Amino acid sequence: MNLQAASRTRAGDRAAIPGLAQFAAGIQGQVIQAQDTAYETARRVWNGMIDRYPALIVRCAGPADVRRAVDFARRRDLLVAIRGGGHNVAGNGTCDDGMVLDLGPMKTIELDPVRRTVRAEPGLTWGEIDRATQAAGLALPGGIQSTTGIAGFTLGGGFGYLSRLHGLTCDHLLAAEVITADGVALTASASDNPDLFWGLRGGGGNFGIVTAFTYHLVPLGPVLGGMLIHSATRAGEVLRFYREFAAAAPPALASVLIFTTAPVAPHIPVHLHGRPVLLVTLCYAGPPDEGERVIQPLRAFGPPDADLVSIRPYTEVQTLLDAANPAGLLNYWKAEYIQGYGDEAIETILHYTAQAPSPNSKLLLNQLGGAISHVPPDATAYAHRAAPFIANINAMWAAPAASESAIAWARDFWTALQPFSAGGVYVNFLSNEGEDRVRAAYEPGTYARLATLKQKYDPTNFFRLNQNIKPTG
């Protein structure tokens, strides 16, 4: 916490920013300052470890507010944080003493079911866009949790339950409406500013503020999805079975293995509440009867302590992990693409997951491949397309006094996984880990190209509260 900013905030005596009243009068949305009753709620983000006190929060009603806010901040040399869904683990959606440009109120959805496209504003979460598209029997390949925002997710690449069959979220991006650092509104697409369009698909929020995304959608009805729950005492044998199963799994099947403590949630049997478990979370995006045949070996193995897989709406599958990731807990993540699950890797995973520092701490193992790997690595800024799996270590705890041990667990776990690395990290899973780890999110040639793009569109590094790529100049 910035204690000086905190004391000023609580005293309500922050010095006025020149021209603020005139600026606020021209905003269609809402300008919130420290003395306002809405400030305490508005400054909070999903990760409870991030405790910052911005000078003002601008809740934008539309692109005109965004342009006005960018111009105001640039003329006064204010630090600017861009917030979409607010789910960023590194806390880049807020700052001390600067301006938070909150896109949360921007939630317009324009669906064209005939062309299978949707224009979506950046304040939307996956739950909101899923409900709108599924009403037309369509879907945008997204994440694995309904509360995550679409904006930062897309700009980092974006993978989830539909990605092995249909590709990354950024692979479905057709166009983006962008406000640049100098306040110019432009469109990025395959035909308009194609260099920027390339960089927006994986390069994060380095190049401007996207005020609307236009995506291509895919047909999707009910899916075969849910989770198989195994006691953690049997996790080793399950993982050894799974590695053979995953090697032959068709692209229509997505699987996420989660080592955690079973949450208290309606879909979790009561006798498992609070127990260490391995969740085999599944979503089959093809014909459900075909999916039943595909996953039958997984359902039979063990058998699991609970089988919660059924034919259900995709929107329901997207909410299954929400209870395990509540807002407000303290979070520190480490992640790495990994090659697979040899015996040594499995033993390492079992050792560290057994030492998880809190009930909400977890390890997520996502299977990638399929359609993700079919796109050339230089086609978008997201470049690690050949990686077969990714490990995401989530230290997640409640008491600030436990921070040191929780962070140490995540770091030690990540270090122990390095012998099994496939190289690199997913930019959306990065905490504040420094420039070398940002570089690791990209191939060397990709990073150099992104730095050149940054020099063109943001030479002063105005947009620097992100996983930052510095301009070449």
Image (cartoon, rainbow, N blue to C red):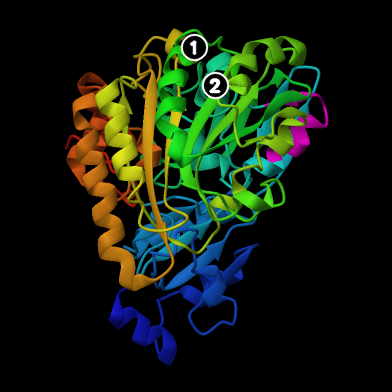
- Where in the figure is residue 76, as x and y percent of width and height? 35, 65
Q: Position of residue 86 (x, y in %)?
A: 51, 54
Residue 99, how many percent across, how many down? 42, 64
Indicate the quadrant containing the C terminus: top left, top right, bottom left or bottom right: top left
User: Which amino acid, mark 2?
Assistant: Ser
Q: Is residue 250 magenta?
A: no
In the picture, the quarter occupied by the N terminus is bottom left
The answer to whether marks 2 and 1 mark residues whose Cβ atoms lie closer than 8 Å is yes
Q: Is residue 442 above or below residue 430?
A: above
Q: Residue at x 77, y 36 (%)?
A: 132
Could you say which is closer to the camera, residue 233 or residue 108? 233
Instruction: Give the number of marks.
Output: 2
The stretch of residues the image draws in magenta is 129-139
Query: Along the polypeptide, which appears first: circle 2 or circle 1?
Result: 2
Residue drawn at (57%, 56%) of the image: 65
Measuring 62% from the left and 45% from the top, which residue is drawn there? 125
Q: Which residue is tagged 2?
A: 163
Residue 296 visible, this orientation? yes
Question: Which residue, given by chain and number where applicable, does mark 1 sit on?
Answer: 370
Position of residue 302 in the picture relative to residue 134 (left or right): left
